[in-house]
């Protein structure tokens, strides 16, 4: 099953060219037709080309007619061009069957698009960090990506942390899934690019952010009324946290989660395998989902999403990541 | 001229107790009656006491009848208690003549108070980092603090960076001065604690924030419409920036300032001696100011601000910091 994959760079410059090449090679070895955007390896300051170059690359990805448009890497660069992103062209491409996949800085484009047109994009891998990982791509990530390509994926699942064994979670249905990188998402608050999702499932992840900064961002979303409007908040992976002994005195991510649970009526789940980690599932930002728990196992289901919009439900195929 | 100074801890726990004691000693050596809040050295997790303890300390500072209520230090802790801060008691205390002084995390309380009641507070020193500095307090900071105590200060001034020698700046009058720490201020956007200042003078500073994060915060304020509503944006000191050679490729703070100037009609000034630096002026957040340039010299004037609200203008006394 050969698919057409278009690779482009909307954010930071690709620095690890070896990882990028490994990623492209891996996707080709899987049998896909991989098209690399002309500006994918451009460099301007810290960006993959200047703003006009990256905007043109996004437009080319939208015009590519590919099955999947995949970012080379995240980093930084999308928030500063949100006023000029071709939202209509992206939405038209998505309607015609191109799935846009990315993570980290890509959160800005995903949620801005959700705010502007409601189009669905995928939080998922990048070429370099994921497909080009030195130890080889993660099995679960690849299985989820394959589900997207074949249109077989209908959901995902994971096991909650042991400390949450007694957590009760009432099933949620017909809720909009949204979110991504917490820092990038929060940097949209107050702007026209922050999606006003009511009764949604908000998932978040971050890297190299101290728990106090994670808490401050969550408090901002809370004080803005965003969190109370959701049906569930789902913590993905928060990596690169370094506590300072004798200073933080136990103020870690679980402290933040516990306080959030104590001050918010909305259920707060943890353990989602998504973030700046190798084992990451793919998540449809903007799609309607249902979510339920069986003991410590959470099932997040979006149903059958075919490129051309058929919405039939015939048995779940989701990769459960423990 | 003995003044009553009340010292309290609304944010992070005081870790450098030696610096704190040096600061208290210095203020006493200047002839002041220094009252230290009972919880000033409390510790809970990373905070100077739990939320209730710090809120009680803020209330005691408001009830102290002191001439100045001064924070022990900044850090983190105010954003998470903004829903419970006694804004009315603080405003009443300010009307009765207590001046509240602080910086960094204190930005949250200052701007929330401005949003809630319009009361004026001072961006300025903290006990430990400033009065307790190992090399002794900075002369200009102490002179500005003395101006506040005596009611003599009517403004401040500074010299713009050499690169801005050709910058033209039309005088601004009757504009509300506001701002402080950029990260803390931005963390209020979208919440009821962000002041909706029109035609103001917005000053900003930060520490240990990479230029790309400074840009992302400014873009958030810009996309929210905040920057275009101002009469001027004033950059204070941005310290602790570490660029990564070969990666940032020249993307420094001046890159951020230049792009802001290219994309915003509002004048952007630089060089304000305020931030996480020893040489810091005191700035009345919420006060009406006028601002004008003479060559590279900027004069920021708030006029006579006496504790009991007389608003007469009799000659400027401002400390010019180069």
Image (cartoon, coloured by chain):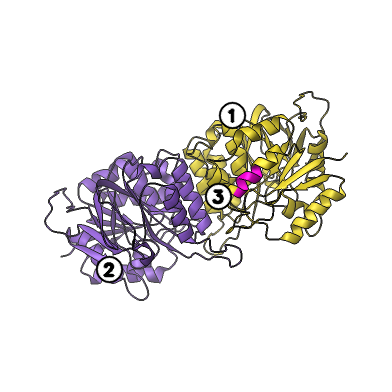
Chain colours: A yellow, B purple
Q: Is residue B218 above or below residue B166?
A: above
From the viewer's perspective, is the residue at label 1 or at label 2 nearer? 2
Element carrying mark 2: helix
Q: Which residue is mark 2?
A: B140
From the viewer's perspective, is the residue at label 2 or at label 3 nearer? 2
For mark 2, name the chain: B
Viewer-proximal residue among B18 and B228? B228
Q: Is residue A114 above or below residue A29?
A: above
Residue A253 in sight here: yes
For mark 1, name the chain: A
**Percent x, y of residue A97:** 74, 32
- Label 1 Cα crowd, 10 Å radius (few <14 / some 14-19 / many 20+): many
**Percent x, y of residue B114:** 32, 44
CA distance separating discs 2 and 3: 36 Å
Element carrying mark 3: helix
**Percent x, y of residue B70:** 31, 58
The N terminus of chain B: image quadrant? bottom left
> Do badges 1 and 3 share one subunit?
yes
The C terminus of chain B: image quadrant? bottom left
> Do badges 1 and 2 share one subunit?
no
Q: Which region of the structure is painted magenta?
A: A53-58
């Amino acid at each position: 099953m050969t698919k057409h994959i278009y690779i482009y760079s909307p954010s930071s410059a690709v620095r690890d060219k070896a990882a990028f090449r490994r990623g492209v090679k891996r996707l080709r070895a899987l049998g896909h037709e991989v098209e690399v955007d002309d500006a994918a390896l451009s460099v301007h300051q810290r960006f993959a080309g200047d703003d006009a170059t990256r905007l043109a690359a996004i437009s080319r990805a939208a015009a590519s007619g590919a099955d999947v448009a995949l970012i080379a890497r995240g980093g930084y660069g999308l928030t500063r061009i949100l006023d000029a992103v071709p939202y209509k062209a992206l939405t038209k491409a998505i309607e015609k069957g191109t799935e846009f996949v990315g993570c980290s800085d890509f959160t800005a484009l995903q949620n801005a698009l959700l705010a502007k047109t409601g189009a669905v994009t995928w939080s998922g891998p990048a070429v370099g960090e994921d497909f080009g990982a030195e130890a080889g791509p993660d099995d679960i990530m690849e299985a989820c990506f394959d589900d997207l390509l074949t249109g077989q994926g209908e959901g995902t699942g994971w096991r909650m942390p042991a400390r949450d064994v007694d957590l009760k979670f009432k099933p949620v249905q017909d809720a909009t899934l949204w979110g991504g990188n917490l820092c990038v998402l929060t940097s949209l608050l107050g702007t026209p690019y922050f999606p006003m999702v009511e009764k949604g499932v908000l998932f978040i992840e971050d890297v190299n952010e101290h728990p106090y900064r994670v808490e401050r961002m969550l408090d901002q979303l809370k004080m803005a009324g965003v969190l109370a409007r959701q049906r569930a908040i789902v913590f993905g992976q928060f990596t690169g946290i370094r506590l300072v002994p004798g200073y933080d005195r136990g103020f870690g991510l679980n402290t933040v989660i516990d306080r959030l649970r104590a001050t918010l009526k909305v259920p707060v789940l943890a353990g989602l395998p998504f973030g700046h980690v190798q084992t990451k599932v793919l998540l449809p930002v903007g799609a309607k989902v249902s979510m339920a728990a069986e003991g410590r196992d959470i099932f997040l289901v979006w149903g059958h999403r075919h490129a051309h919009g058929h919405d039939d439900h015939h048995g779940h195929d989701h990769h459960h990541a423990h």
